[in-house]
Amino acid sequence: MSNNLSLYNIFYTVGKTSNISKAAKELYISQPAISKAIRRLEEELQTVLFKRSSRGVFLTDEGKLLFHHVESAFNSLKTGEDLLAHNRTLGISQLRIGGSTTLCKYILLPYLKNFIQAHPHVKLTISCQSTYQTLSLLEEGKIDIGLVGKTQNLKNFSFHPLCPIQDTFVSTKDYLRNLSLRSESKDLFSSATFMMLDEENLTRQYINCAFEKNGITLKNILEITTMDLLIEFSKIGLGIACVIREFVQEELSSGLLQEVNLGLTFPQRTVGFACKKTNLHLPIIESFLKKIG
């Protein structure tokens, strides 16, 4: 296999260009050398890989099958080279962090202050997306550290807990009072408007599971894209919002919002930083995790 790497590179280039002359220019070798390499690979594989015509060369069905796998292999090699280059840079001057907008605002910002003061030369990039997308970016090597809620899908990652969070439901006193005036039903699940994050959000899925376990169905659901909007909409009396208690402490203390007792208990969850186990030894990641520890 290793001896054939150059043959596969020639095969891949010809397959991309469908033209031996173009492939020769791209690889800086002669056209006869290209043709000889293709013949050799076909002989070794005992398969015809190209159809030849006056318009160029075209992959056979067998050639297309092989090309698909060769292309994937070369793309993987390119990704590996990019990651090695990034790791060299990472040890000196760059750290890529990902997390949801909510977690970045309420949890990440306080932890960044000490790190920035200790490493003013480090270039930080922060991307905001859902927890599932953050874990996907971590797996692909497109970010270095993810701020996520602890899930069962962390087998390939090292998880460093930061703090617990508590799911709760809140509304204004006026909303509950007005609801009782306009609705004869005392069952909040059927009469109230429940404001929730969208179905792809980890918090929403967690709450949905709790409702399903207790046989509860919400009749009126208003989906909101961010936790900040959930909080703001609950403050103007639009409905009952599912939020993180730690993120509305000020509103609860002032009486602007109050917790709504739904007769359910939601266990605390844990938020922390996740990174690939293979990257734990990188100096900048070690330093970052030490600062937040």
Image: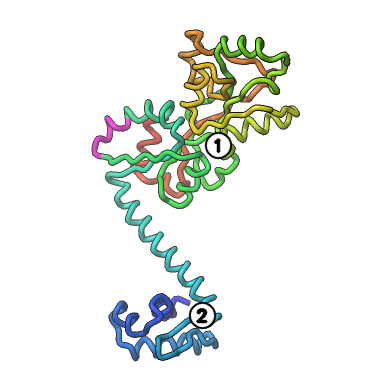
Q: Position of residue 146 (x, y in %)?
A: 45, 40
* Vertical placement of residue 192 versus 108, above or below: above
- Residue at the limit of the structure toward the front, as seen here: 182
* Vertical placement of residue 49 versus 241, above or below: below
Query: Which residue range is magenta in the image?
Result: 115-121
Q: What residue is pinned by disc 1? A: 201
Q: The C terminus is located in which quarter?
A: top left
* Vertical placement of residue 120 versus 70, above or below: above
Residue 20, quarter of picture: bottom left
The structure residue drawn at horizontal position 47% and vertical position 8%, both measured from the top left corner, is 254
Could you tell which of marks 1 and 2 lies nearer the N-terminus? 2
- The residue closer to the viewer here, 222 or 197, is 222
- Badge 2, how many Cα within 10 Å: few under 14, some, many 20+? some
**Amino acid at the residue labelled 1:** Asn
- The residue closer to the viewer here, 262 or 11, is 262
- The residue closer to the viewer here, 38 or 223, is 223
Q: What residue is pinned by disc 2? A: 63
- Residue 65 located left or right of residue 147: right
